[in-house]
Amino acid sequence: MIRVGIYGYGNLGRGVECAIKQADDANLVAVFTRRDPSTVKILTEGVPVYHIDKAESMKDAIDVMILCGGSATDLPLQTPALASIFNVVDSFDTHAKIPEHFKNVDLAAKKGGKTAVISVGWDPGMFSLSRLYASAILPEGKDYTFWGKGVSQGHSDAIRRIDGVVDARQYTIPIDEALDSVRSGSNPELTTRQKHKRDCYVVAAEGADKAKIEAEIVNMPNYFADYDTTVTFISAEEMNREHSSLPHGGFVIRSGNTGWESENRHIIEYSLKLDSNPEFTASVILAYARAAVKLSDKGQHGCKTVFDIPPAYLSPLNSAELREKLL
Amino acid sequence: MIRVGIYGYGNLGRGVECAIKQADDANLVAVFTRRDPSTVKILTEGVPVYHIDKAESMKDAIDVMILCGGSATDLPLQTPALASIFNVVDSFDTHAKIPEHFKNVDLAAKKGGKTAVISVGWDPGMFSLSRLYASAILPEGKDYTFWGKGVSQGHSDAIRRIDGVVDARQYTIPIDEALDSVRSGSNPELTTRQKHKRDCYVVAAEGADKAKIEAEIVNMPNYFADYDTTVTFISAEEMNREHSSLPHGGFVIRSGNTGWESENRHIIEYSLKLDSNPEFTASVILAYARAAVKLSDKGQHGCKTVFDIPPAYLSPLNSAELREKLL
């Protein structure tokens, strides 16, 4: 049995807890929180909640620590700090800072003789793998990644910061015509506007100037100005009733050619349709937590990404079983 | 540069030759054939064609030998025989015999200090990987594999053996209603007949009894009796004009649930739409040939499958480039 610790208990931490419940080979040892542990109620009966200060003292009781903090401020500090003490997995997704994060975590993990896997989830994660496999197979080709339909937390937060907005939910939606044209193999050049649109649901404060709010949203640089954006004002009740879940998903498509004169066309498509973004991310993370423990047991220490890990390590089945059942 | 040999020059061998042309890091050293080499004309200028008897004498000139024979009689003998001399890759696809083949190849490769990768292509191969990743992520779920629309060589051959048949082409076609029901997440139990249908195009000999041929096809046990099968008689000219290419493809879909009460549903779908089955298979094989050489250089000898190989090894890019560009 793999003894797992959860470090940080928000949506992602709860998702990891649910994934552990489904795994026959993993046990939850403890949840660690920055809050007062007595105020944190978890789902699993009989499992303790500790303050994060207690984590280090439990290093011999935990095979892998799953870091469930955010990429902006938590993980850049937490993952290197914990990687010299525990095998760790995180979901660091600030793309531009991955090289720096990798270097910091690699140093710490090698120093402690531990294995760390960073940037695990679906993008970065499963989508990255799809891009890698497809581009290695079809070097003469073009990659497309579409996201959605799904809730973007960052864009929802940006709307919430506007004066007069009480609550907001933003859906990123891939545009069907763009998907169809990619799937046809025509390798189109697509602008930002042609690939995705953004639908926003907003609860405005009483008496707020809705026209002004809408204008501020659709013209917001980087976030909305380059997209066709629709804004719909709804009540707080409707927000809770219709928009409280966190669905997401998307498509990675590579279209490429083979043949002596590149005369044959091939389309590789990987897609996800997810009811719960955090729970799916957590399920990917738990599979890589299993891999982290196996790698560590084999002495393969340091920082890894999904690109470095043999697929078999994700499964609870052994190699002979995998060849027989899944090959 | 990776120095590649091609062992067997049919559709797959030609596909590998085309894939090498596209690769910046691979060179074709020689093609080996059982035929009289003077009768075999290849596409690449300046590359020699040798009889297979000459292969062993070239062991220091070739980094990886790609075996392009058939699974029925060629590969069970050729792969173990060559795996102690060369790093090798094959596309062995007789599922029930994979454990035995693996054992024989593993023994030979370890004896020779070489690396062998077996059962490479898209099924077994990329579809197997999709099944493995998806089932490791969503343990509470169900897998579905659909094939087509594409030409099945085995089924086409079975029709050709019928009395009065001059030529035949059989297309395996997934049934849309079945795909839709799987994608809806309803986890249906599907019969063989509900998943695929079979379309047959047949050139009959002059004066042959077409009704009898059709009855023989649709009632053929194992091959057609369990499917809705249509038979269309066409001319030899139409066969050549409309049915000379070898398209294929298919879908691997896993539908699974997460959440404390399994309340959230997720659909993972991987699909291929291929103009040329042998060329795509060859392109997958060349990527794994690159991996075989890297594994061998690291001293990781013996037999491997796609499950055992870190994805990064398939790419000509190094790990830092991959993290920057594709993660």
Image (spheres, coloured by chain):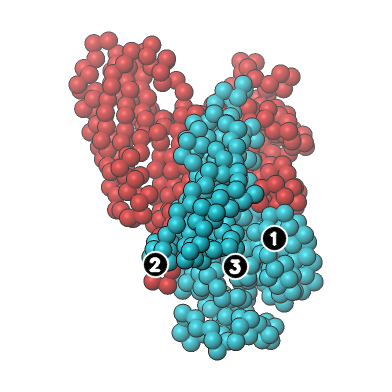
Chain colours: A red, B cyan
Residue B237, which numbered label?
Answer: 2
Identify the image quadrant of residue B299. bottom right
Alpha carbon distance from label 3 to label 1 = 12 Å
Q: CA distance from mark 2 to mark 3?
A: 39 Å
Q: Nearer the viewer, residue A305 or B13?
A: B13
- x and y, in percent, of residue B150 in the image: 49, 54
Give the chain letter at badge 1: B
Coordinates of residue A4 in the picture (x, y in percent): 70, 34
Q: Residue at x 56, y 50 (%)?
A: B215
Above or below: residue A73 compared with residue A160? below
User: Which of the pair B323/B283 is nearer the observer?
Assistant: B283
Is B314 above or below relative to A316?
below
Give the mark nearer the N terminus: 3 vs 1.
Answer: 3
Q: Amino acid at mark 3?
A: Ala
What residue does disc 1 label?
B304
Q: What's under tag 2, amino acid-wise?
A: Glu
Front: mark 1 or 2: 2
Q: Tell me which residue sits at (60%, 32%) in the image.
A: B189
